[in-house]
Image: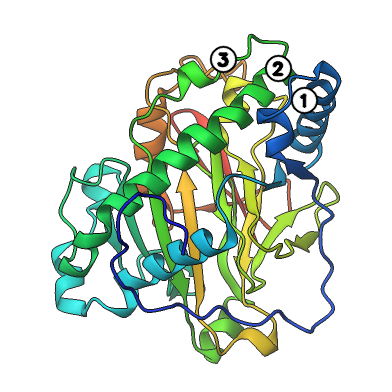
């Protein structure tokens, strides 16, 4: 099997992904970016076309797929195998030793336990997360993960240098900036991968209208989600409807977060998305997510609104949103039906149901 490192691979149990749903869902038609055509081509026409394609995708959706990102299907499957280990092979007592201190520190390193976020009508979430920094030695990890840390670190490095940097160059060119201007704001620091899965009872589904995570925007600049078969992710279209994100084998789903909206002056909008209960034929399966979150700490945000007297730094924004998410007291919008609001650092944050 291909490897992210040039060494024999520790054996891991294979994670068996769910079959595709047979239900007819209303999918969003997201653009597909062939990353290899940018990194391998010196043809200015090819680059110009890709820049226009990414600019359009960010302006219209804030979401797009990336193919030919440098990892084979076998390598990606191996990372899903590793991603399942913190949940399936670590007992509850050991998980408590590595539980993250979200409220105290505003960082999500280690385990986020189930029932931490309030969803609706007194129902709390069943989402379990294991997050780690790209510097895998920055904190401790369960014993079963120790032999796999070099592989995880190389995975993070690949995402950062071979996937993120080309995308940032495309985004910068789309803003008529120098090619490396956004790369300079995303140094190899404070990045994390999160491994996530979700189960819940029928009664709780009914009380929350099958909503697992309210519509929200991500904290950082970009989020990479390695596509997996269980349908649960939806994005909010401009007409207010919710559309499903379709699975594409070995694709990365890229979405824009708050930081890229701030840094681009709003040209690239942070995308509103949510997670809902999967279709009936997939509900017996556990949804496992493999994410790479980008959290640039080195740059201040541009002011988001004229009323915002002082823009927050990325660190302030990240920690504030991490502490408040799922725990803040939200108020129903007086203007928009189905929208709940809170203020953080003088910036209005909306949650969508």
**Residue at label 3?**
180
Nearest the eye: 215 or 247: 247
Nearest the eye: 316 or 310: 316
Residue 134 visible in the shown view: yes
The colouring scheme, among rainbow, by chain, secondary structure or one colour, is rainbow
Indicate whether 167 appears above or below 17: above
Q: CA distance from mark 1 to mark 3?
A: 14 Å
**Residue at label 2?**
173
- Image quarter where the C terminus lies is bottom right
Please tell me whether mark 2 sits on a helix, a strand or a loop: helix
Indicate whether 153 appears above or below 221: below
Q: CA distance from mark 1 to mark 2?
A: 7 Å
Which numbered dot is residue 240?
A: none
Q: At 84% across and 54% down in the image, what residue appears?
A: 29
Q: At 26% across and 40% down in the image, what residue appears?
A: 135
Classify 10 Å Cα crowding around label 1: few (below 14), some (14-19), many (20 and above): many
Q: Earlier in the sequence, mark 3 or mark 2?
A: 2
Choose top left, top right, bottom left or bottom right for residue 165: top right
**Residue at label 1?**
51
Q: Earlier in the sequence, mark 1 or mark 3?
A: 1
- Dots 1, 2 in contact, CB < 8 A: yes
- Dots 1, 3 in contact, CB < 8 A: no
- Dots 3, 2 in contact, CB < 8 A: no
Choose top left, top right, bottom left or bottom right for residue 217: top right
Please tell me whether mark 1 sits on a helix, a strand or a loop: helix
Residue 114 visible in the shown view: no
């Amino acid at each position: 099997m291909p490897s992210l490192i040039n060494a024999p691979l520790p054996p891991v149990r294979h994670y068996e992904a769910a079959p595709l749903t047979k239900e007819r869902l209303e999918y969003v038609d997201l653009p597909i970016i062939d990353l290899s055509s940018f990194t391998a081509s010196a043809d200015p026409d090819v680059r110009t076309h890709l820049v226009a394609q990414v600019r359009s995708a960010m302006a219209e959706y804030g979401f797009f797929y990336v193919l030919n990102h440098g990892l084979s299907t076998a390598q990606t499957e191996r990372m899903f195998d590793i991603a399942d280990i913190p949940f399936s092979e670590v007992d509850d007592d050991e998980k408590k030793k590595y539980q993250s201190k979200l409220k105290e520190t505003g960082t999500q390193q280690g385990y986020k336990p189930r029932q931490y976020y309030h969803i609706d009508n007194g129902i709390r979430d069943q989402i379990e997360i294991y997050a780690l920094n790209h510097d895998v030695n920055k904190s401790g990890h369960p014993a079963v993960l120790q032999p796999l840390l070099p592989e995880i670190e190389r995975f993070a490095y690949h995402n950062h240098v071979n996937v993120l940097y080309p995308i940032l160059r495309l985004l910068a060119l789309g803003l008529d900036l120098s090619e490396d201007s956004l790369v300079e704001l995303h140094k190899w620091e404070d990045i994390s991968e999160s491994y996530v899965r979700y189960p819940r009872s029928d009664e709780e589904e009914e009380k929350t209208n099958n909503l697992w995570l309210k519509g929200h925007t991500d904290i950082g600049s970009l989020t990479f989600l390695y596509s997996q078969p269980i349908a649960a992710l939806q994005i909010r279209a401009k007409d207010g409807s919710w559309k499903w994100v379709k699975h594409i084998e070995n694709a990365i789903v890229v979405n824009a977060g708050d930081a890229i909206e701030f840094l681009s002056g709003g040209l690239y909008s942070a995308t509103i998305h949510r997670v809902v209960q999967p279709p009936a034929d997939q509900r017996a399966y556990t949804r496992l997510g493999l994410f790479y979150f980008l959290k640039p700490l080195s740059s201040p945000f541009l002011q988001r609104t004229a009323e915002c007297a002082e823009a927050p730094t990325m660190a302030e924004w990240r920690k504030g949103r991490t502490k408040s998410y799922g725990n803040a007291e939200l108020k129903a919008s007086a203007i928009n039906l189905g929208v709940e609001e809170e203020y953080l650092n003088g910036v209005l944050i909306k949650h969508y149901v």
